[in-house]
């Protein structure tokens, strides 16, 4: 039986959101990250937040916070690298902070795929698009990810596919992967 913890990725610059910290932006009266936390909590007991700014605000959610070890906002893989180092579990589930509808069976399906396929990583797909920020990664890939980043690589799907990651079908839940990239999108229904 593999052990899993989760990391919510909230460490980006949010350029398309005019620099506003995505996870802290309100959607239906609550910060986006609060929606994500509420959808993860029934699925997993250990949740951490990867944030690189507004740490005091993120601490209010009562979860452990950590920042990227690599400087200069090097993308989600940088947060994943640090998350794999911080984790005390066999695998780490990663999810973005701006997807308030994430699947309620995300952990179950990704874990099942990893166990059945005997691989070190799995990620979500909606049947049309891959969603590599919704992924389950073994800590055994820590060295490979570190070396990948040292080479200057930042392409998440490329990293996962080169590690024989399995794509997990969530085509019946396409809307679960809706995310928000602009302040205007947050205001629309």
Image: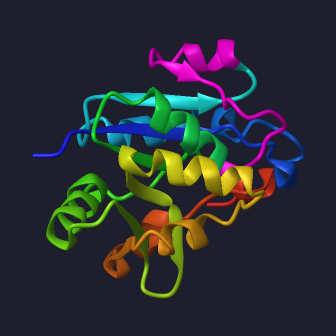
9 and 16: which is toward the camera: 9
The residue that appears at 65% across and 30% down in the rendered structure is 51
- Whether residue 99 is visible: no
The residue that appears at 52% across and 30% down in the rendered structure is 49
In the image, residue 64 lies in the stretch drawn in magenta = yes
Q: Is residue 53 left or right of residue 143?
A: right
171 and 112: which is toward the camera: 112
The residue that appears at 43% across and 76% down in the rendered structure is 125
Query: Which residue, as the protein is rendered here, is positioned at the far bottom?
Result: 128
Q: Is residue 85 left or right of residue 107?
A: right
Task: Please tell me whether residue 83 is drawn above or below residue 86 in the rendered image.
Answer: below
Q: Give the percent coordinates (x, y) of residue 185.
A: 72, 59
Task: Please tell me whether residue 42 is drawn above or below residue 182 in the rendered image.
Answer: above
Q: Main secondary structure of the magenta part?
A: loop
What range of the chain is rendered magenta? 55-76
Q: Quadrant of the C terminus?
A: bottom right
Q: Is residue 123 left or right of residue 88?
A: right
- Colouring scheme applied when the structure was drawn: rainbow
Q: Give the percent coordinates (x, y) of residue 56.
A: 67, 12
Image quadrant where residue 104 sits: bottom left
In the image, residue 166 lies in the stretch drawn in magenta = no
134 and 72: which is toward the camera: 72
2 and 145: which is toward the camera: 145
Q: Is residue 48 left or right of residue 40?
A: right
The residue that appears at 80% across and 33% down in the rendered structure is 71
Q: Give the percent coordinates (x, y) of residue 47.
A: 38, 30
- Whether residue 61 is visible: yes
Q: Give the percent coordinates (x, y) of residue 165.
A: 39, 70
Number of numbered discs present? 0
Query: Which residue, as the protein is rendered here, is positioned at the far left?
Result: 1
Image quadrant where residue 97 sits: top right
């Amino acid at each position: 039986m593999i052990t899993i913890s989760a990391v919510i990725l909230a460490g980006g610059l949010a350029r398309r959101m005019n620099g506003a910290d995505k996870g802290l932006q309100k959607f239906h009266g609550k910060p986006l990250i609060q929606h994500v936390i509420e959808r993860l909590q029934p699925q997993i007991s250990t949740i951490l937040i990867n944030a690189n700014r507004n740490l005091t605000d993120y601490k209010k959610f009562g979860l452990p916070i950590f920042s990227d070890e690599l400087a200069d906002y090097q993308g989600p893989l940088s947060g994943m690298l640090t998350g794999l180092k911080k984790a005390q579990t066999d695998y780490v589930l990663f999810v973005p902070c701006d997807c308030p509808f994430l699947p309620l069976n995300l952990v179950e399906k990704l874990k099942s795929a990893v166990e059945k396929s005997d691989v070190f990583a799995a990620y979500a797909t909606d049947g049309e698009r891959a969603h590599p920020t919704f992924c389950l990664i073994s800590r055994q890939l820590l060295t490979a990810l570190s070396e990948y980043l040292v080479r200057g690589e930042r392409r998440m799907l490329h990293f996962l596919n080169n590690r024989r990651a399995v794509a997990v079908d969530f085509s019946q839940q396409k809307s679960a992967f809706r995310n928000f990239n602009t302040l205007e999108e947050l205001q629309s229904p």
